[in-house]
Image: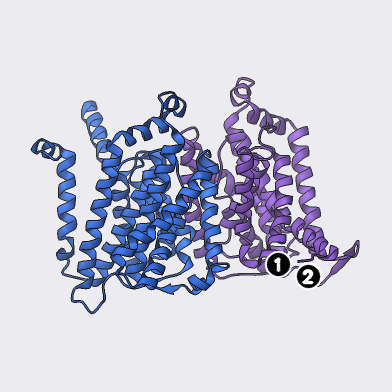
């Protein structure tokens, strides 16, 4: 099959934008893993909640959905903090399988609570810029994709500045590097757990809003697959490494779109695992695994 | 192998009582088709979760056992359709497909741990589902699935009752097989690998060999369970590879108690009864929430599962008695 340059570029741009949502999820997972050394498999359910929060506010207020990032992020931060306190703190340090099992319980609870509140129909909302496409380097791309890419970059830069420049961010990085050492320096590590989980959940909420504005359909059960993919990205990039998550997310988004293009739509979900398995066979710690913090 | 002395132990008495109960339970309610169906599915899932739990003896786990559950089903259904043999035979041949794929997946997973293992096994279930609906759809009928011959024709009087007893016998045999494997040197090797892989290696145990063995056995019996289910239903669709099917044995085994033979059985029975009980009350979405909350409570407050509940209550009563 001959893939012309135009189509290749088009696929890469789809991939970039799909990658943005995965990067937000994967960065959140990594942040939580870095500080708490746990993995929240129910992360996709937070994305779903973010999507539905956006949906509810949008149907009530009719605001531009991009503005609703200001609603979905704080609400999800609160949800994240509650989940951390009630579910993950009691099992911290009890064995790595327990967090997978707790997540399973959370998945069931959040999905079906959402199904009761919002019913299990597939929903979609339309971005106000839906019909606008712009042309960059001869490639047509919807304006929404560009806004999503820019928004993601802005969020990641804000996170970077927070982690590098503020006292709180430094305390969080200290906790992720050496928990005991941080404790001895007077850092309240349990509060760091709470904050990192909150921020991780907030990033998932932002991903949910972006999911909605990109015109993708959503229902209460849609969260699992994006989360699993995000986790695959985290493993590909190396656990705990945020640059790894970004590179992994981009590689992944592009690979997924190429797979749809060449193997057919049925492979959309399976391709992530093929990549994951290939990476793990070659390097069981992930691409950036050893260089992580 | 079984002496009178064994019968004096409380554990064995309970086991015997459970077995007798399983044999008479269909008659307690009059022969009722709905209850028989629930009981049959319960047995199928007891086999399935016991097979999943078998994997945890070597310190492995899986979030994608639906792959083997489904492959056993497809293997058996296709062989039965091609040869016309009775499902009671094809079940055990078809599950070979699950074991074979299990061996392959196990080879890839054998060095992975925890989350990595969970992800890769989860991924394989999705990959296999995708293959079934795309590349292999000429044989598998794609998303529509195919018809599978029933275990017993419904024209036979009391066919469900016979089906129940035949599956009960299969279940008991499989659990006994697990019991003897775990009691043998192999079981000891499993424990050694689970507790400390380095020391196990130093003692001359090859962890890779034993892990692969566990993966294959677990996949085979998960396949048997899947084949039994689809021959009971009379059809098979790729839904059988769904995330739910992968998660059920995990939930059953954890709520019952990981790493024990009785755990998955107790967990399956309790959760299934709860599940069907809630359904008969007309609760649909909320029962997932109930199961989810129950799961989290068990993990936090009862890490050894429901089978440790009597001991915990006894402990609690004793400390209370001491205080007063």
Q: Earlier in the sequence, mark 2 or mark 1?
A: 2
Residue at mark 2 to residue at mark 1: CA–CA distance = 8 Å
Q: Residue furthest front?
A: B83
| Chain letter, purple | A
Circle 2 crowding by C-alpha within 10 Å: few under 14, some 14–19, many from 20: some
Tell me the SS state at disc 2.
Answer: loop
**Chain to which the residue tagged by mark 2 belongs:** A
Compared across the picture, whether A63 is left or right of A146 comes to: left
Percent of width and height locating residue A96: 49, 37
Q: Kindly indicate whether the residue at mark 1 contacts the one at mark 2 (C-beta within 8 angstroms).
A: yes
Residue at x 61% of width, y 60% of height: A269
Circle 1 crowding by C-alpha within 10 Å: few under 14, some 14–19, many from 20: some
* Residue A285 visible here: yes
Residue at x 68% of width, y 61% of height: A259
Q: Is residue A253 above or below residue B60?
A: below
Compared across the picture, whether B194 is left or right of B173 comes to: right
Compared across the picture, whether B39 is left or right of A136 comes to: left
Instruction: Specify the quadrant that holds the C terminus of chain B.
Output: top left
Residue on which the image places disc 2 = A130
Percent of width and height locating residue B26: 18, 64
The quarter holding residue A11 reads bottom right
Instruction: Specify the quadrant that holds the N terminus of chain B.
Output: top left
* Residue A49 visible here: no
Residue on which the image places disc 1 = A215
Q: Is residue B27 above or below residue B10?
A: below
Q: Residue furthest bottom?
A: B155
The quarter holding residue A55 reads bottom right
Q: Nearer the viewer, residue B320 or B183?
A: B183
Q: Colour of chain B?
A: blue
């Amino acid at each position: 099959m001959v893939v012309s340059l135009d189509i290749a570029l088009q696929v890469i741009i789809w991939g970039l934008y799909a990658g943005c949502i995965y990067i937000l999820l994967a960065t959140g997972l990594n942040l939580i893993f870095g500080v708490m050394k746990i993995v929240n498999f129910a992360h996709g359910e937070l994305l779903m909640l973010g999507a539905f929060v956006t949906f509810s506010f949008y149907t009530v207020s009719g605001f531009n959905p991009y503005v609703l990032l200001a609603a979905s992020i704080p609400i999800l931060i609160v949800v994240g903090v509650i989940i951390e306190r009630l579910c993950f703190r009691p099992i911290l340090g009890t064995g790595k399988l327990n967090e997978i099992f707790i997540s399973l319980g959370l998945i069931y609870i959040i999905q079906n609570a959402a199904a009761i509140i919002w019913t299990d129909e597939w929903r979609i909302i339309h971005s106000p810029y839906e019909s606008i496409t712009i042309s960059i380097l001869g490639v047509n791309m919807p304006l929404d994709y560009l806004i999503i890419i820019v928004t993601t970059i802005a969020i990641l830069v804000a996170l970077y500045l927070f982690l590098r420049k503020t006292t709180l961010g430094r305390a969080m990085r200290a906790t992720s590097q050496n928990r005991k050492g941080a404790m001895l320096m007077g850092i309240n590590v349990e509060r760091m757990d709470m904050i990192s989980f909150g921020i991780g959940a907030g990033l998932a909420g932002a991903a949910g809003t972006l999911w909605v504005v990109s015109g993708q359909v959503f229902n209460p059960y849609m969260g699992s697959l994006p989360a699993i993919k995000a986790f695959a990205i985290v493993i590909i990039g190396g656990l705990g490494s945020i640059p790894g998550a970004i590179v992994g997310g981009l590689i992944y988004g592009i690979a997924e779109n190429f797979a749809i293009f060449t193997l057919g739509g049925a492979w959309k979900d399976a391709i992530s695992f093929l990549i994951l398995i290939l990476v793990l066979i070659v390097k069981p710690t992930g691409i950036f695994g050893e260089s992580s913090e | 192998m079984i002496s009178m002395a064994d019968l004096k132990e409380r554990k064995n008495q309970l086991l015997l009582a459970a077995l007798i109960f399983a044999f008479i339970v269909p008659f307690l309610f009059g022969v009722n088709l709905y209850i028989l169906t629930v009981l049959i599915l319960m047995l199928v899932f007891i086999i399935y979760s016991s097979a999943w739990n078998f994997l945890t003896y070597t310190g492995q786990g899986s979030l994608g056992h639906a792959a083997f559950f489904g492959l056993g089903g497809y293997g058996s259904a296709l062989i039965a359709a091609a040869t016309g043999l009775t499902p009671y035979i094809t079940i055990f041949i078809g599950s070979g497909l699950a074991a074979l794929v299990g061996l392959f997946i196990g080879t890839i997973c054998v060095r992975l741990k925890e989350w990595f293992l969970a992800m890769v096994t989860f991924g394989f279930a999705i990959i296999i589902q995708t293959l079934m609906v795309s590349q292999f759809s000429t044989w598998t009928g794609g998303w529509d699935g195919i018809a599978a011959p029933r275990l017993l024709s419904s024209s036979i009087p009391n066919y469900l009752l016979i089906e129940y007893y035949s599956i009960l016998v299969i279940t008991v045999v499989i659990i006994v097989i697990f019991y003897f494997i775990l009691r043998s040197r192999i079981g000891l090797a499993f424990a050694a690998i689970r507790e400390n892989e380095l020391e196990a290696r130093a003692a001359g145990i090859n962890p890779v060999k034993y892990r692969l063995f566990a993966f294959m056995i677990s996949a085979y019996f998960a396949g048997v369970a899947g084949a039994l289910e689809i021959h009971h239903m009379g059809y098979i669709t790729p839904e059988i590879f769904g995330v739910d099917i992968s998660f059920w044995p995990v939930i059953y085994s954890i709520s019952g108690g990981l790493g024990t033979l009785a755990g998955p059985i107790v967990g399956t029975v309790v959760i299934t009864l709860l599940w069907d009980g809630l359904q008969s009350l007309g609760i649909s979405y909320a029962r997932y929430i109930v199961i989810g909350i129950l799961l989290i409570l068990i993990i936090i407050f009862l890490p050894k599962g429901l089978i440790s509940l009597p001991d915990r209550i006894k402990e609690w009563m004793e400390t209370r008695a001491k205080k007063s």
